[in-house]
Image (spheres, rainbow, N blue to C red):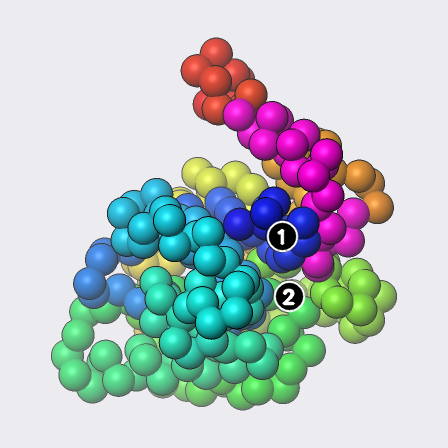
């Protein structure tokens, strides 16, 4: 999706890939819900949907093009997910609303919400967190992609967020903190969250926007990566090599 255009939100895909894979591996199609709060993260769900046959691979060729519903920054009409939004900080409110509606309707659906750490600078996130804990919405699990990257630079140079886990705990949430690039750990955390009763859960996933591609330069802008043809070829070659049966990564 990124290579043909030479630029795009590759860093978000790299930081959230294991989280997206874990959710799509555990969520029950047709029942559970997925909210992608930061719209530029939608590239991950698009890729996962193709792997599961939920989206035609040919559709990805229209990624980011004018008039395409496979958008570079997701909107309310984006396929695959139940809700996404361009304005940051709104996704948790949507997830809480979906979960409350499901409870009132007697549904056993779970709601998974992908959030970014930069969004925690938005007051609406914490209002939603208070509401979710007050109503004991244990069907909600937040995957918080703590990649320390936002458009203005490293998140910790803009606003001090840590201790993130303690903040969520003080709001009445069940909190787990994991290596966000350990798919097994993320899956285990999601399974554990599903067993928690009477409070929602948040999994703080520590990640990097260049994880999984050694060819990316050290100074690559994690928020919006430029990918000229030579670097795109190097990235594809590296990924293909990792997928060989004899590779230690497989």
The residue sitting at 69% across, 39% down in the picture is: 229
Residue 139, compared with residue 232, is above or below; it is below
Density class for disc 1 (Cα within 10 Å; few <14, some 14-19, many ≥20) is some
The residue sitting at 71% across, 59% down in the picture is: 223
Q: Residue furthest left?
A: 106
**Residue picked out by circle 2:** 117
User: In the displayed structure, does residue 198 sit left or right of residue 239?
Assistant: left
**Residue picked out by circle 1:** 5
User: In the displayed structure, does residue 86 sit left or right of residue 75?
Assistant: right
Q: Residue furthest top?
A: 246
Q: Secondary structure at mark 1?
A: loop
Instruction: Indicate yes or no whether the magenta region holds residue 27.
Output: no
Q: Give the alpha-carbon distance from disc 2 to disc 1, as whole Å.
A: 27 Å
Q: Position of residue 204 (x, y in %)?
A: 56, 58
Density class for disc 2 (Cα within 10 Å; few <14, some 14-19, many ≥20) is many
Q: Residue furthest front?
A: 66
For the question of whether residue 53 can be seen, the reply is yes
- The reply to whether dot 2 and dot 1 touch (C-beta < 8 Å) is no
Q: Which mark is residue 148?
A: none
Q: Position of residue 89 (x, y in %)?
A: 57, 79
**Closer to the camera, 89 or 226?**
226
The residue sitting at 44% across, 63% down in the picture is: 70
For the question of whether residue 169 can be seen, the reply is no
User: In the displayed structure, does residue 55 sit left or right of residue 148?
Assistant: left
In this picture, which residue range is highlighted in magenta?
Answer: 220-240
Instruction: Indicate yes or no whether the magenta region holds residue 224.
Output: yes
Q: Tell me the mark number nearer the camera, choosing from 2 and 1.
A: 1
Residue 33, compared with residue 9, is above or below; it is below
Q: Position of residue 77 (x, y in %)?
A: 39, 76
The residue sitting at 23% across, 79% down in the picture is: 102
Q: Position of residue 179 (x, y in %)?
A: 58, 44
**Closer to the camera, 209 or 137?**
209
């Amino acid at each position: 999706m990124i290579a043909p255009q030479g630029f795009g939100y590759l860093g978000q895909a790299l930081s959230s890939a294991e989280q997206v894979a874990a959710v799509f591996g555990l969520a029950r199609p047709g029942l559970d819900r997925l909210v992608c709060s930061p719209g530029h993260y939608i590239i991950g769900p698009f890729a996962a949907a193709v792997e599961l046959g939920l989206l035609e691979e040919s559709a990805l060729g229209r990624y980011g093009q004018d008039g395409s519903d496979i958008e570079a920054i997701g909107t309310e009409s984006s396929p695959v997910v139940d809700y996404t939004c361009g304005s940051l900080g709104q996704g948790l409110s949507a997830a809480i609303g979906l979960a409350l509606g499901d409870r009132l309707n007697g549904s056993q659906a779970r709601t998974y919400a992908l959030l970014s750490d930069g969004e925690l600078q938005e007051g609406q996130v914490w209002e939603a967190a208070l509401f979710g804990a007050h109503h004991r919405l244990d069907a909600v699990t937040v995957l918080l992609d703590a990649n320390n990257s936002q458009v203005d630079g490293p998140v910790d140079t803009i606003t001090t967020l840590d201790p993130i886990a303690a903040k969520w705990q003080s709001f009445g949430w069940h909190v787990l903190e994991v290596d966000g690039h350990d798919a097994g750990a993320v899956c285990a955390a999601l399974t554990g969250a599903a067993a928690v009763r009477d409070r929602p859960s948040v999994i703080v996933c520590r990640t990097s926007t260049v994880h999984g591609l050694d060819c990316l330069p050290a100074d690559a802008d994690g928020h919006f990566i430029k990918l000229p043809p030579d670097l795109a070829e190097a990235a594809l070659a590296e990924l293909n090599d990792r997928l060989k049966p004899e590779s230690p990564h497989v």
